[in-house]
Amino acid sequence: MSNMLVQRPTTRASAPKPQSILIVGCGIAGPVLASLLLRSPGPASSLPHITILERNPSFISSGQNIDIRGIGKQIIRLLDLEDEIKRSTTGEEGVQFVDENNRCWAEFAVDKSGKVETGTSDVEILRGRLAQIFLDKAERLSKDVQDRGGKGVEFIFEDSLESLHQDEGKAHVQLANGGERSFDLVVGADGLHSRTRKLAFGNEAEGCLKKLHMFAAFLSMPKEDEDGEWRSWFHAPGGVSIMLRPSGTKEKSTVLILLADKSGIIADQLAGSERSIPAQKKLVMSKLNRIGWQEQRLTKAVEAADDFYFDVTAQVNLAKWSHGRVVLLGDAGQVYLT
Ligand SMILES: Cc1cc2nc3c(=O)[nH]c(=O)nc-3n(C[C@H](O)[C@H](O)[C@H](O)COP(=O)(O)OP(=O)(O)OC[C@H]3O[C@@H](n4cnc5c(N)ncnc54)[C@H](O)[C@@H]3O)c2cc1C
């Protein structure tokens, strides 16, 4: 018998095609998801083809202090970003509750070991800096995947979802500037007022935003010596609560103004001009009237702020976070505060 090998026809299973994934929103959640997907095991050519769509010309660098806790810490560790993020923290020493004379009545120091969570986390960072770090990471990973023969991430700025429909094969989206595209999966990471949620969930999403009877204004202002590195938290009569916080820089302090609105008066006052910054500023300045603590300074700061951000605090209440080929992520799906 010949010992020649008999070549049998093989039925090699073809590798599954990489998934195409559209992530709507280049805020915090969008770039984090892209990075996690690009770290999936397997050859670069098998990794998903990711498109990130952001309606602004670039990522939004505004926003003030964000505390990273719990699962957030696990994620930054997973992305090897813990050291970089810890080098960029605001350095807040803790929280002091103050009265109109700036007298401290109670204080809670941060636990810098991170073992005990207090009002101040050991990882406090400005939102814009965090967004930049996550975007840089996604870009680095994308470049690495492309160098290894994969597709990486396609970034589309200054465009947004116009419409969305899905069939058994794909989710089809119409972009405002960029024509029609089809994807295996669409991820709505487009924040509290998610358009993806509205388009994909339709009537189901109607009324899913449970307002928590509170509005929040975020801004920064020039730092003064007495601001220090502690958060000062002042409660004024009439449901106004103000936090003055370090930013991690010598130049500015950050401010969070919370306005309680149990009666719905603020919502009524803003009706029709919810997205108008001059109207929002006017309302906040009226609430600062006669609060008795840093009044003039805060009023001027609100008027002058070019990083003023104002929104309702709300919670998204949906029975599920996915609808066919569309899934919600971050504030678009579940949020307790703005
Ligand atoms: C300007 C801003 C400032 C903030 N400041 C603070 C703060 O100081 N402290 C705090 O705790 N939280 C703040 N937040 C909220 C905080 O970022 C989120 O709670 C959290 O980080 C979850 O992020 P996210 O990615 O789900 O949503 P977001 O951070 O809101 O990001 C959503 C992204 O989607 C984009 N987007 C929205 N609609 C569309 C669309 N139709 N098409 C394409 N892109 C779209 C937005 O421009 C944004 O880049 C802020 C959010 C914003 C947008």
Image (cartoon, helix red, strand yellow):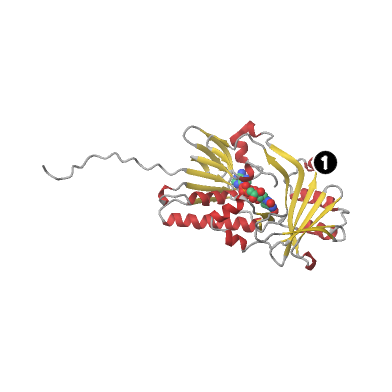
Give the answer, above or below, for where 226 lies relative to 25: below
Spot the residue most to the front. Answer: 115
Residue 324, visible in the rendered structure: yes
Q: Report whether 237 appears left or right of 315.
A: right
Position in image of residue 165 (x %, y %): 54, 34
Q: Is residue 264 above or below residue 31?
A: above
Q: Where does residue 151 sit, x and y in percent of width and height?
A: 44, 50
Q: Secondary structure at mark 1?
A: helix
Residue at 74%, 62% in the rendered image? 253
Q: Is 207 rendered above or below residue 283?
A: above
Q: Is residue 9 left or right of residue 155?
A: left
Residue positioned 41% across, 47% down in the render? 46
Q: Is residue 83 above or below residue 15?
A: below
Task: Residue at 86% x, 47% y: name it.
Answer: 238
Q: Residue furthest left?
A: 1
Indicate the amino acid at tag 1: Ile
Residue 232 quadrant: bottom right
Choose between 94 and 17: the one closer to the eye: 94
Label 1: how many Cα within 10 Å (few below 14, some 14–19, many 20+): few
Quadrant in which the N terminus is drawn: top left
Q: Quadrant of residue 198?
A: top right
Q: Residue at x 67, y 37 (%)?
A: 317
Number of marks? 1
Task: List the residue tagged with mark 1.
Answer: 265
Residue 162, by quadrant, is top right
- Residue 96 seen in the current view: no
Q: Position of residue 227 (x, y in %)?
A: 78, 64
82 or 239, which is in the foreground?
Answer: 82
Asked if ligand 1 lies within 8 A of label 1, the reply is no
Estimate the x, y position of residue 88 in percent, counting from the top left.
Answer: 63, 62
